[in-house]
Image: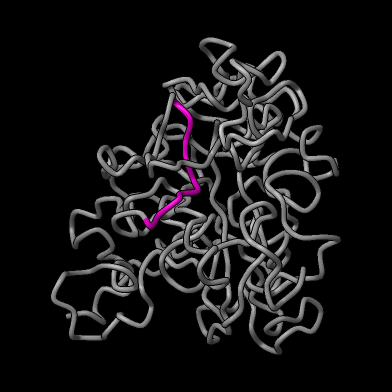
Amino acid sequence: MRYAENKISKSFNRPKMTVAVAGMLLGAVCLLPGAGMAQVTGPCVSCHTMHNSQGGASMNPASTTTVFRSLTKGDCVGCHTSTTNALVETNTPKVNHGAAPASPTDTLAGGSFYWVQTANAKGHNVLGIAGADSLGNTPPGGSALASQLTCAGTVGCHGDRTVADQYASISGSHHAAPQNAGTVAGAVDGTSLANSYRFLKGIKGIEDPTWETPATLAANKHNQYYGVSRTSDAVTGTDGTISALCGQCHGAFHASATAHNDTTAPAAGISYANNMTSPWVRHPTDFDMNKVKTKEYGAYGGSGTNAYVPGVPVASNSITAIKSTVLQADGDAIVTCISCHRAHGSANDDLLRWSYASMDAHASTDGNVGCFACHTTKDT
């Protein structure tokens, strides 16, 4: 099944709210096509069971007597959980693990929900994986949700967010045949749920066929996120970008003209329109580094080479091809929420891709990593 990424955390020192993967087949996730398209292929028995019984034992992968709708063997959590800590099993991406992955990078693109089970600040507390956190059902930078986060549905990230029921929200997606948004395999344009990035309705992008498995991840082999370079503070949530999806729950972190944790009161003088002369009140999103490539940001990926850095991904306003180099043309190096965060969870607070506490200016010995991938002169 296709996987998502999305965001923010405890910042802000608080745990976060939600998202995970979903499936109408919440279990029909079991067989994903190898080309990045989400249409399920393979034996029906891999995902479905007729009577949930074989030799007197439950067909539920968790070996419980729980039964699931649509005759699936498991729900979103069950199908995308690995007890062996595999990243992919029978072509099904695993985003929840029974033990800590060997290193923070030994996960797929969205990270793992493993860590939120040990500390609220390290992942989205999705129902069925972790309990409600100290914020209740209010995501940082947003308004209260009707209930705890789920994988899909109106309080989830995947599926149709206008449909409350998780199964109905994601229904049909795994068996639908997406139409490429362009000539490149895995490109989806958000025109339908099946044709949306990782079943995040309306979101565009190019899906890596192996969900960014570490062994194959490279400058020319990764998800290509869609982004826009905004010039105003308006956040519609309908522009098809990965940040706009995050902003539907974490709105105050998405706009530049709103005070921290306040989605209505503007901060005087701070806006996308005048950000070149006014200071930011929070880290920008939907911002194209091409606007400032004459400064330190122009050395992202290496001065003169500008190779795409999978560990600190940037979005593009084009999904016609995977970007292996950036800062070549306007709109190809857009900062997004997931440039710094992992959607599901990580070993670091605030779902960060790296330890913020270890970012030591002018003292790093391992090159431009983490914050320094963009803020290149702060590390030299």
> Quarter-wise, where is residue 162 in the image?
top right
243 relative to 379 in the view: left or right? right
Q: Residue furthest left?
A: 365
Residue 126, percent from left and from top: 66, 56
Percent x, y of residue 362: 20, 86
Answer with left or right where residue 200 lies relative to residue 85. right
200, above or below 34, in the image? below
Taking the spot 50% from the left edge, 48% from the top edge, the residue there is 96
Screen quadrant of the C terminus: bottom left
Say which residue appears at 54% left-offset and 50% top-offset. 5
Q: Name the residue nearer the viewer: 205 or 334.
A: 205
- In magenta stretch: residue 6: no
Q: Is residue 94 magenta?
A: yes
- Most extreme residue toward the front, as rendered? 56
Q: Position of residue 271 (x, y in %)?
A: 64, 78
- Horizontal relation, residue 320 to residue 145: left or right: left
Task: Tell me if residue 15 comes above or below residue 200 in the rendering.
Answer: below
Where are the magenta residues, as a range?
Answer: 91-100
In the rendered image of this protein, does residue 148 appear above or below residue 219?
below
Name the image quarter holding residue 313. bottom left
How many marks on residues? 0
Residue at image point 53% right, 13% down: 41
Q: In the displayed image of the protein, which residue is found farthest to the bottom?
A: 268
Q: Position of residue 208 (x, y in %)?
A: 41, 34
